[in-house]
Image (cartoon, rainbow, N blue to C red):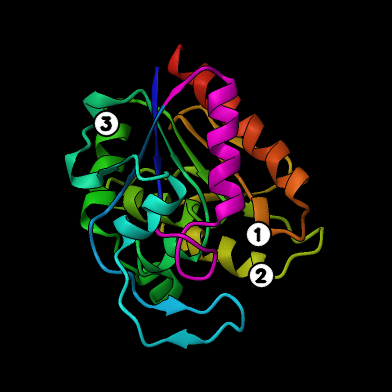
């Protein structure tokens, strides 16, 4: 069984959330899955200094930065086809909303990066399962909007502490046809019809062990869906 992990850079503020990406890699490895790390070969929207939060005057490539997490073993997304894999997982991090899409800037009116859109549409058409962590469900919601497919997704809950506007995020994905469901970190939401699993992870105030719990559940369900 092969699962692709779609990365968007290296670092929460301008790329993939590293804790989430590594947790997914560990969970999938424990499930005895062959993992293919992949990322689009394009420049990041911008580069953020993760020490002080300020933008840096640099240009970095999403594939090159993602290779840091993959220890160099990474495939350009343009070379990956749905036929090559059994499932797809998207970690969170602002890169999902800045590099894989423009949701961070344009919300429901955002665009999705071309190769990201292609692989999601290929996977969905082939009924191969997809897991989306943290903020990355916005990417799925936007891609599936074009096909009139309203996926059931979560970005968290307003019933627990969060550093983000969960209600606003849920209103945003509802505006593009998704059905938002409240869910706390450590838990998952499963859309059996569209074969999509989502977990809020660091969209909520959570410890690394709490986000791992949710990711482990998401990965386990992803693998189960492959066999269904």
> Does the stretch in magenta take in 12?
yes
Q: Secondary structure at mark 3?
A: helix
User: Can you say whether 17 is above or below 225 in the image?
Assistant: below
Give how far apart the Cα atoms at labels 3 and 2 are.
32 Å
Residue at image position (52%, 60%) is 93
Q: Which residues are magenta?
A: 9-34
Label annotation for residue 27: none
Q: Would you say 147 lies left or right of 157 here? A: left
User: Can you say whether 24 is above or below 68 in the image?
Assistant: above
Identify the image quadrant of residue 126: top left
Cβ–Cβ below 8 Å for labels 1 and 2? yes
**Disc on the earlier residue, 3 or 2:** 3
**Disc on the earlier residue, 3 or 1:** 3
According to the picture, the residue beneath numbered tag 2 turns out to be 164
Q: Would you say 144 lies left or right of 215 here? A: left
Q: Would you say 70 lies left or right of 208 here? A: left
Give how far apart the Cα atoms at labels 1 and 2 are.
7 Å
Query: What crowding class fits label 2: few (fewer than 14 Cα within 10 Å), some (14-19), or many (20 or more)?
Result: some
User: Can you say whether 129 is above or below 162 in the image?
Assistant: above
Q: Secondary structure at mark 1?
A: helix
Residue at image position (66%, 70%) is 164
Q: Nearer the viewer, mark 3 or mark 2?
A: 2
> Does the stretch in magenta take in 3?
no
According to the picture, the residue beneath numbered tag 1 turns out to be 203
According to the picture, the residue beneath numbered tag 3 turns out to be 125
Q: Position of residue 121 (x, y in %)?
A: 27, 40
Q: Position of residue 130 (x, y in %)?
A: 43, 35
Q: Outermost residue, right direction?
A: 160
Residue at image position (26%, 59%) is 113
Which image quarter holds the N terminus? top left
């Amino acid at each position: 069984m092969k699962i692709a992990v779609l990365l968007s850079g290296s670092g929460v503020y301008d790329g993939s959330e590293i804790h989430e990406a590594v947790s997914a890699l560990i969970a999938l490895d424990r499930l005895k899955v062959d993992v293919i790390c992949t990322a689009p070969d394009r420049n990041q929207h911008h580069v953020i200094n993760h020490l002080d939060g300020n933008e840096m005057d640099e240009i970095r490539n999403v594939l090159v930065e993602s290779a840091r997490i993959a220890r160099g073993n990474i495939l350009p997304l343009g070379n990956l086809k749905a036929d090559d894999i059994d499932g797809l997982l998207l970690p969170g991090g602002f890169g999902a909303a800045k590099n894989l899409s423009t949701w961070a800037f344009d919300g429901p009116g955002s665009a999705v990066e071309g190769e990201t859109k292609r692989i999601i549409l290929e996977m969905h058409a082939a009924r191969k399962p997809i897991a989306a962590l943290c903020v990355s469900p916005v990417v799925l919601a936007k891609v599936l909007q074009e096909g009139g497919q309203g996926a059931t997704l979560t970005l968290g809950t307003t019933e627990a502490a969060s550093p983000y506007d969960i209600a606003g995020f849920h209103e945003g994905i509802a505006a593009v046809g998704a059905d938002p469901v409240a869910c706390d970190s450590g838990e998952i939401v499963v859309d059996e019809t569209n074969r999509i699993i989502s977990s809020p992870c660091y969209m909520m105030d959570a410890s690394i062990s709490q986000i791992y719990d949710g990711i482990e559940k998401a990965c386990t369900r992803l693998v189960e869906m492959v066999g269904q």
